Amino acid sequence: MVVALPAVYDAFDLPRTDLTARALRFAEEAEPAVIFRHSVRSYLFARALADHDGMEAGADFDDELVFLGCVLHDLGLSERGNGDQRFEVDGADLAARFLREQGAGEEAVAVVWDAVALHTSEGIASRKGPEIALAHAGITVDVLGRGKELLPEGFADRVHAAFPRADLAHAMTDVIVRQALDNPAKAGPLGFPGQLLRHHVPAGALPDWYDLIDAAGWGDRPTTARHDGPLQERAAESG
C-alpha cells in the first residue's frame, strides 16, 4: 500500500506502508523534534550503508523493520516512554506495545524490540540480524559519525538540510541525564545512561565496577595493585 507522506520526505526513499506512516506519526507526536529528526536520519543513513555494502531490501533485509527500528528507537526519551527502566528498554517496550496495537506479528515485534533495546550496545547489535545491525549502524553514524565516510558524497548534507541536527548529540544527552537525575533507577552504574549520569553527580555518588565488586560481600581481593597491574605495565612498556 502506497501512503502519502509530507513533502519533506519526497526526496528520500522511505518505505510507504500504512504501518510505517503510522509509526512515523506516532514517533513525531511523542518525541521532542530534535530526537524525532535524529530517528529519521538514522534510517536514511542505515539504508545508505546497506547500499554501500551491496545489500538489497527484500532479499538481504526487511526494509520496513529497519525503518521501524530506527524511527521508534528513541521512544524512551519521550514523556510517553519515560518509565523506570533504562531508556533503551523503556523505548523498546513502548515500541512493542505500539506495534501490537497496529496488528504487527510477534516476529516483527521481536526484531524491533531488539533493535531499540540494543541500539547503544556496541559489539552486540552488530551481531544480531541484519535489521538490528543496520539500525544500530545508522544510529551510530548520526550520533558519533562512525561510518559517515561510507555515505555517498553530499548525501549527509542533503539529509541534514531536510532534517536539521540542532546539536542532536548534546540535546539527546541532556534528555538522558535529565531522566536519570529525576529517577536514578533508570541509570544503573554499568550501563550507558549511568556513564552519562556519572558526570553530573558528586564524585563517588554513583559506584563504579570496583565499588560494586568490593561491596559484593564475598571478600574477593585484587590479585594485583589496581594502579600497578598488568595493564599498566603493558602501557608503560608500549610507551
Image (spheres, rainbow, N blue to C red):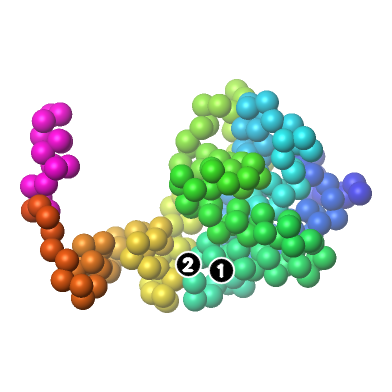
> Mark 2 = which residue?
86
Residue 136 in view of the camera? no
The label number, if any, that marks residue 147 in the structure image = none
Instruction: Work out how far the residue at label 1 is from the one at label 2, CA to CA, in angstroms.
Output: 6 Å
Membership of 228 in magenta stretch: yes
Q: Identify the element where label 2 is drawn.
A: loop
Instruction: Please state the horizontal and vertical placement of residue 238, each as a whole percent of the image.
Output: 15, 29
Q: Residue at x 67, y 54 (%)?
A: 111
* Magenta highlight: main SS: helix
Of residues 174 and 101, which is closer to you in this image? 101
Pointer 1 residue: 90
Task: Report the amino acid beneath label 2.
Answer: Arg
Number of other residues with Cα within 10 Å of mark 2, as a class: few under 14, some 14 to 19, many 20 or more: many
Q: Residue at x 59, y 28 (%)?
A: 151
| Residue stretch rendered in magenta on the structure | 226-239
In which quadrant is the C terminus drawn? top left
Q: Is residue 231 magenta?
A: yes
